Image (cartoon, helix red, strand yellow):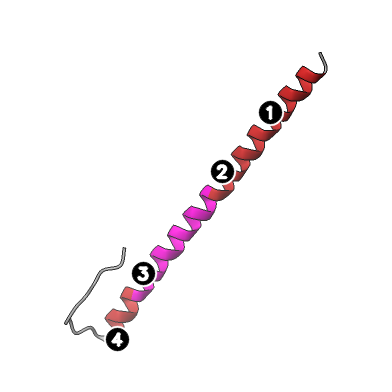
Amino acid sequence: MRKVIRNVKESPEDKIKRLEEEKLNLQLALAETIEKQVNDKIEMQLALAEAVEMFAAKGGD
C-alpha cells in the first residue's frame, strides 16, 4: 500500500529507493494475481472435464 508523505523533504536517492520498493510490491501483487487466475482457470477446466465425463457416462446407460 502506498504511503502518503506530506511536507517531508525527500532526497532524490530516498525517492528512488521508495519508488523501487513500490514498483517491486506492485510487481509481486501482479504476479500473485496472475498465478491465482491461472490456478482458477485450471480448476475450472478440470471441473468442466469432470462434468462432461459424468454426462457422457449417464448418456451411455
Q: Which residue is mark 3?
A: 22
Q: Nearer the viewer, residue 59 or 6?
A: 59
Q: Which residue is mark 4?
A: 12
Rendered location of residue 60, percent (x, y): 83, 17
Measure the C-alpha gap from mark 3 to mark 4. 15 Å
Whether label 4 touches label 2, CB < 8 Å: no
Q: Residue at x 76, y 18 (%)?
A: 58
Element under disc 4? helix
Q: Which residue is mark 1?
A: 51
Q: Which residue does the image show at 66% across and 39% down from the upper left?
A: 45
Where does the magenta region start and end? 19-36
Q: Earlier in the sequence, mark 4 or mark 1?
A: 4
What secondary structure characterizes most of the magenta part?
helix
58 w.r.t. 25: above or below: above
Please tell me whether residue 57 is drawn above or below residue 42 in the rendered image: above
Q: Which residue is mark 2?
A: 40
Image quadrant in which you'd find residue 29: bottom left
The reply, left or right, for residue 40 in relation to residue 14 is right
Residue situated furthest right in the rendering: 60
Q: What's the residue type where badge 2 is placed?
A: Asp
Closer to the camera in the image, 50 or 35: 50
